[in-house]
Image (cartoon, rainbow, N blue to C red):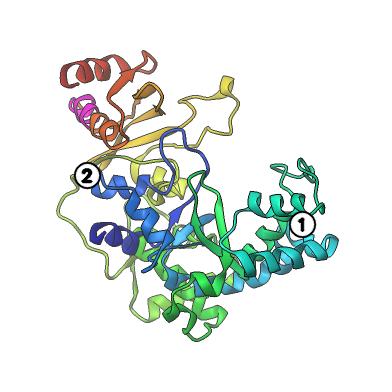
Amino acid sequence: MRHVQGVIDRLGLLQIDSVNVLARAHLLPVYSRIGPYDTALLDRAAGRAPRRLVETWAHVASFVPPETYPLLEWRRRRYRTDAWESISGVARTHPEVVERVRAVVTEQGPVTASEVHDLFVADGTAQPHERDGWGWSWTVAKRALELLFFTGEIASARRNAAFERCYDLTERVLPPHVLAMPAVSDADAVRALVEIGARAHGVGTLRCFKDYFRLTGPAVRTALGELVEAGTLAPVQVRGWDAPTYRHTAAAVPRRASAITLLNPFDPLVFERARLEQLFGVHYRIEIYVPAARRVHGYYVLPFLEGENLTARLDLKADRRAGVLRVQSAHREQRATSTTAWALANELLTMASWLGLSSVDVRPVGDLAPELAAEIARDG
């Protein structure tokens, strides 16, 4: 847990996503930094005391340290009127449902959206298959829960085995020391969030830092100026970068980079695609939402970090029923080396073991696939 906590402290957030073709999005950045670990540690960190993570809307849906939660109060306040109409509008169109959901969570929380809907069905106030036709066909009860979640009245106490949020009152989720923290002004909150983003990046531009928590508006540039004036950020020059660039003064400057790991599409290192391309010379786009016929590299593509370079990208799938880690495609990047296939084969075998899979299968798709398959056959 000490190693997991170190990753949490350095990154400041872990993005949540429902795609589970390989592993849940929030699990993989920790693996990329400390290697195979017991994923139950993250469940424990986010689901019981001492709570080390709490869920909120940060980059997007994310786990953040509880101390960061108050820094996003201004966003939750705005969501009362500025969230998607399908969420914020439920208070106007179905106020009685919102009130009823509030009472259910107070009396019975933690509860899931499906449990709340089932309660409504049981007493005849909803039909078993009632949906409102919006988005993911959420029930009105689910929309009411999301409104209360987005605005901070309720929080996610944990995720269940089906990865559903279990909603409870926020005061029953946040640790006492966080509940006792004094209110933070909007300006101080934005400055603190910019600083977290800068610390996580080490080096970056204003665009990099503000994207970390999806910050907008003139307050962000003001916050950056204050951090420079305070000595927290120092202006630096990065070869090939035209925009003003800054280094967090706590960032270490290593003599060499020796990491060998796969990065998932939701890893903080690849959040800001322009920065990724400037640093590594790799144009990377997630293709999950691209029609299959138009995909270039695949559905769930992970860049491979080898030392200081991204040297390959792979489309991976965990075939849990067959016990196989499937490499749907394997492509070289411009900076691939003679050792890339060998290093990648070792990484895939390690990842497969971590995921509880017994073997790795490489499809003959992509210019790296033949060499990679040979290395897997040799080592596996």
Q: Nearer the viewer, residue 242 or 43?
A: 43
Q: Residue furthest right?
A: 93
N-terminal of the pair, mark 1 or mark 2, is 1
- Say above or below: 196 vs 16: below
The amino acid beneath tag 1 is Glu
- Does residue 226 appear left or right of residue 73 in this picture? left
| Residue 351 makes an appearance in the image | yes
Give the x, y percent position of residue 65: 41, 66
Give the x, y percent position of residue 70: 51, 75
Give the x, y percent position of residue 160: 50, 50
| Residue 368 makes an appearance in the image | no
Was residue 345 drawn as part of the magenta stretch in this picture? yes
Q: Within the image, what quadrant is residue 249 found in?
A: bottom left
The residue to which callout 2 is attached is 259
Q: Which mark is residue 138?
A: none
- Does residue 340 appear left or right of residue 66 in this picture? left
Q: Which residues are magenta?
A: 338-346
Q: Within the image, what quadrant is residue 64 found in?
A: bottom left
Q: Residue at x 14, y 54 (%)?
A: 255
Q: Residue at x 56, y 78 (%)?
A: 186
- Say above or below: 376 vs 10: above
> Callout 2 environment at 10 Å: few (<14), some (14 to 19), or many (20+)?
some
Image quarter of the N terminus:
bottom left
The residue to which callout 1 is attached is 85
Was residue 318 drawn as part of the magenta stretch in this picture? no
Query: Regarding mark 2 in the picture, which secondary structure is present there?
Result: loop
Q: Residue furthest front?
A: 122
- Does residue 295 appear left or right of residue 201 in this picture? right
Give the x, y percent position of residue 310: 31, 37
Mark nearest the camera among 1 and 2 is: 1
Query: Regarding mark 1 in the picture, which secondary structure is present there?
Result: helix
